[in-house]
Amino acid sequence: MFSKIIHIAGRECRQMFSNPIYFFCMIAFPIFVVSFFTTLMDDGQPVELPIGVVDQDNTGTTRHLTRMLDGFQTSHVVGHYPNVNEARNAIQRGEIYAFLLIPKGTTAGLMSQKQPKISFYYNGVVMLAGSTTFKDLKTISTLGSAAVGKTKLSMLGKTDKEIVAFLQPITIDLHMISNPWANYNVYLSTTMVPGLLMLFIFLITPYSIGTELKFGRAKEWMGMADNHPLIAMLGKLLPQTLIFLIIFLGFEFYIYHVMGFPHPGGVLPIILLGVLAVVSAQSFGAFAFGLMPSLRMSMSVCSLWAMVSFSVAGATFPVSAMDAPIQALSWLFPLRHYYMIYQINIFNGFPIEYAWIHWVCLLAFAILPLLVMRNIKRSMLEFEYMP
Amino acid sequence: MAFIWGKEMKMTVKDEGVLIFFILVPLLYPLLYSWIYNNEVVREVPVAVVDNSRSAESREFIRKCNASPDVDIAYYCKNLEEARELIGRQRVHGIINFPSDFAKNINRGTQAHVALYCDMSLMLNYKAIYMTVQGVSSRMNSNIQIEKSNGFTDRDDEITTKPLDFDEVQIFNPTGGYGNAILPGVLILIIQQTLLLGIGLAAGTAREENRYGYLVPISRHYNGIFRIVGGKSLCYFMVYCILSAYLLLVIPRMFGFTIMASAQALIGLMVPYLLSCIFFGMTISCMIRYRENVMLIVVFTSLIFLFMTGISWPKNNIPAFWQGVSWIFPSTFGVRGFLTISSMGGTLNDIKPEYEALWLQVIIYFLTTCAVYQVHINRVIDHVTHFGKHDK
């Protein structure tokens, strides 16, 4: 039996060498994807986002405010506009993401205690840029208020400690567990890249099975396994498993070891998850083909599954905020379980049993193809390729 | 040209694969996508409380957090260890911890601390919790200041706590929602990706059906490049005019996304966008040897194209190299232009760089398409003359 598997695996290797698409989808594109995402967000957080100022007051105080804003790491004042309309147009042209409006009489009002009002407008369409600039502008406004209070209090002879305690009686000590930099590379690359790697596995698996039918080699393939579908499948998928494992574990080595992404959970869950992700994705692809033994249909379904995965994995928008039917459907996507296991066991470092149900689900995906073995055999021996 | 157009039209309807990508996916996928994101914002994120202070002040803080729309105080824990356990079990996404001297510090006039622990595996949850807790603390701070400042009137108190008032206005996204921000871009991207898939599939089929693996059949109808390119692209263009109308006019209205595009701006953007997508797809399609390969090549690029448009990671922070790469693809300019005219109500003038780039792409990809087809026609002609000699 083993010799048969090895024999079929050897045949598979020859096929992979002869069709360049395998090289691209199993090695070239995955490496491209990994380097794209990790270099794209290399800054970790958006920095020096362009913002504008509409300073109609134009006094020393307001200019100081503008300078402070410019001094923040995330904001960069690139334009001064005479009025709101021009600043809004600049947002529409994509030149700035937000602007601060300081109306005429702000400084005078501040001095005479008339509670003047400044406003900031930020673009809600590019969400990350909008919320980042919003944070800076909010800090500036709070600091502006605090500066006034501070001057008044030190005039009364209060010490710095008293002033701080008066201005901010309660402060918040924020602890961002595992990702204290709010690093978006850590946040997004750890789910998006595995999702894309699984997409390649999703597609290559039915492609390699389906092309046996397409090129009329199915009977030869089955014959080599004495018409035993399990042996045929094992032999066929084995070389692919090995290549994808190298790619997937290589990716994990790169982000966790070389890039130093946080992984308090340790090495064991990382390796286990890598192996299980590859195997379950392959199994899902094989299962899809077994259900619909048509190359095009199974690949279309796998494409759809892979693309929807990115949304229902819940890494960007939480699954708990989606409608109930979608919450239920999310269990059918391997990437959802990958993400849950990643964040519980690797990112937050809880023991494996905390995410046991997701491990079980991934294992269940891995044995799915056993259900359709007979179907695969029948299709290989009886079906003709239909475009 | 009309013959080729007719043949291509017939194929679009008859070939199941092309039908799926040209009609079914653009029709149904946006519905699914909109459904996933239709709740727009994250509400009532569960949080655990570890209250070592057990004072009126700490309870006021907790009550105010619970009353906010974004946070739900789901559990009270004895200690941090217990609360950490709840994070591991995914019951809560944050912990608010009051130290035992919390109330004492407030009343004594020294600074009191609240520790907030956030699960960082989901930025939107973190944002909801952090913003809420910060808001509550600043409101309580104001009340404490008012008590201490002995103002004469309410107006005095207001001014003491907030000498400089400020307003925050989120523009162009009234719900502040996720779907509203990301879906317009996705809709535009769907147009490009389904076009690439459909055209690639059609070209793959043409080559497979051809006895010698050529893109262009040996027929007297197919002896001019402009005929072939014109006929085929006209077919795709007509189909996608209708689909674009559905994607960009019907879908956003069904789900209530911001849409402010004027007809003039929309047509001004979409015509070059569709044409550049079509010619880009036709150029790429020459590389498709077998029809199914197109899925292997195109599907994974969707996510990469989406990130290249700057809709998620801001475009100013995309490294220069990837910026350059992104200019190759129509979607980069298409999405940016569409966001401006539709989500932000811009005019055609505001997206001048985008539509100029798109027209440039139309010209370049039209020429490359012609070149590619010329190569294929030459091969066919070579083939015919070669075999012709043999026959003699």
Image: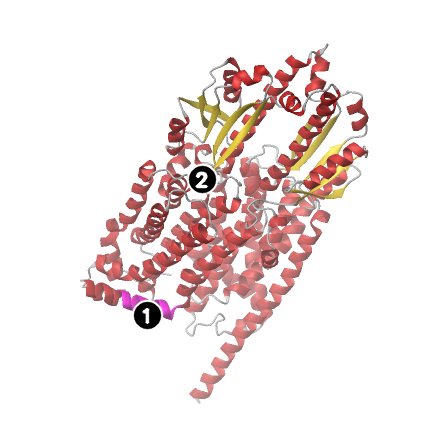
The N terminus of chain A is located in which quarter?
A: bottom left
Q: Main secondary structure of the magenta part?
A: helix
Whether residue A210 appears in this view of the structure is: no
Tell me residue B323's x, y (percent): 61, 55
Chain-order first, disc 1 or disc 2: 1
The C terminus of chain A is located in which quarter?
A: bottom left
Amino acid found under the numbered disc labelled 1 = Arg
Q: CA distance from mark 1 to mark 2?
A: 39 Å
Residue A139 shown in magenta: no
- The residue lying furthest to the top in this view is B152
Q: Mark 1 sits on what residue? A: A14
Q: Mark 2 sits on what residue? A: A314
Exactly how many numbered labels are in the figure? 2
Q: Quadrant of residue A3?
A: bottom left
Chain name for mark 1: A
In-image side of A77 versus B372 (left or right): right
Tell me residue A162's x, y (percent): 65, 21
In-image side of A383 versus B354 (left or right): left
Amino acid found under the numbered disc labelled 2 = Gly
- Relative to B31, say whether B3 is above or below: below
Chain name for mark 2: A
Residue range (magenta): A9-19
Tell me if mark 2 has few (under 14), some (14-19) or many (20+) residues whose alpha carbon lies within 10 angstroms of its own: many
The residue nearer to you, when weighing A149 against B172, is A149
Which residue: 63% across, 60% down? B361
Tell me residue B285's x, y (percent): 50, 64
